[in-house]
């Protein structure tokens, strides 16, 4: 009985640590991309639109 309890608690610990660790990594990796987008919007003004990150020129300018 004790062995099963220890195994169950260990699995729960790994799951809980994984849940709290993953969002922190996502925010750390997203910071530089958010900064680049913010700088681009400040540079070009409010008419900036992003078409796609996979095109040669992902930014276009359009008047509103």
Image (cartoon, rainbow, N blue to C red):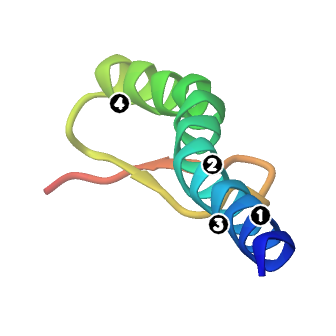
Q: Which of marks 2 and 4 is in front?
A: 2
Query: Which of the two discs, 4 and 1, labels the residue nearer the N terminus?
Result: 1
Q: In this view, does 44 lie to the left or right of 36?
A: left
**Between marks 3 and 1, how big is the CA–CA gap?**
10 Å
| Residue 59 spot, x, y in % from top left | 54, 46
**Between marks 4 and 1, how big is the CA–CA gap?**
53 Å
Q: Residue 17 carries which label?
A: 2
Q: Mark 1 points at which residue?
A: 6
Q: Residue at image x 86%, y 71%?
A: 3
Query: Which of the two discs, 1 and 2, labels the residue nearer the N terminus?
Result: 1
**Between marks 1 and 2, how big is the CA–CA gap?**
16 Å
Q: What element carries label 1?
A: helix
Q: Is residue 32 above or below residue 24?
A: above
Q: What element carries label 4?
A: helix
Residue 19, quarter of the rendered image: bottom right
Query: Which of the two discs, 3 and 1, labels the residue nearer the N terminus?
Result: 1
Q: What element carries label 2?
A: helix
Query: Which of the two discs, 2 and 4, labels the residue nearer the N terminus?
Result: 2
Query: Which of the two discs, 3 and 4, labels the residue nearer the N terminus?
Result: 3
Q: Is residue 27 left or right of residue 42?
A: right
| Residue 20 spot, x, y in % from top left | 52, 47
The front one of 31 and 56 is 31
The front one of 23 and 54 is 23
Q: Which of marks 1 and 2 is in front?
A: 1
Q: Which mark is residue 41?
A: 4
Q: Nearer the viewer, mark 3 or mark 4?
A: 3
Crowd tier of the residue under label 4, counting other residues whose Cα lies within 10 Å: few below 14, some 14–19, many 20 or above:
some
């Amino acid at each position: 009985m004790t062995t099963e309890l220890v195994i169950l608690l260990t699995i729960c610990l790994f799951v809980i640590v994984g849940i709290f660790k993953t969002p922190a990594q996502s925010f750390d990796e997203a910071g530089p991309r958010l900064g680049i987008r913010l700088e681009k919007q400040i540079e070009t003004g409010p008419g900036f639109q992003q078409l796609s990150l996979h095109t040669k020129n992902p930014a276009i300018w359009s008047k509103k």
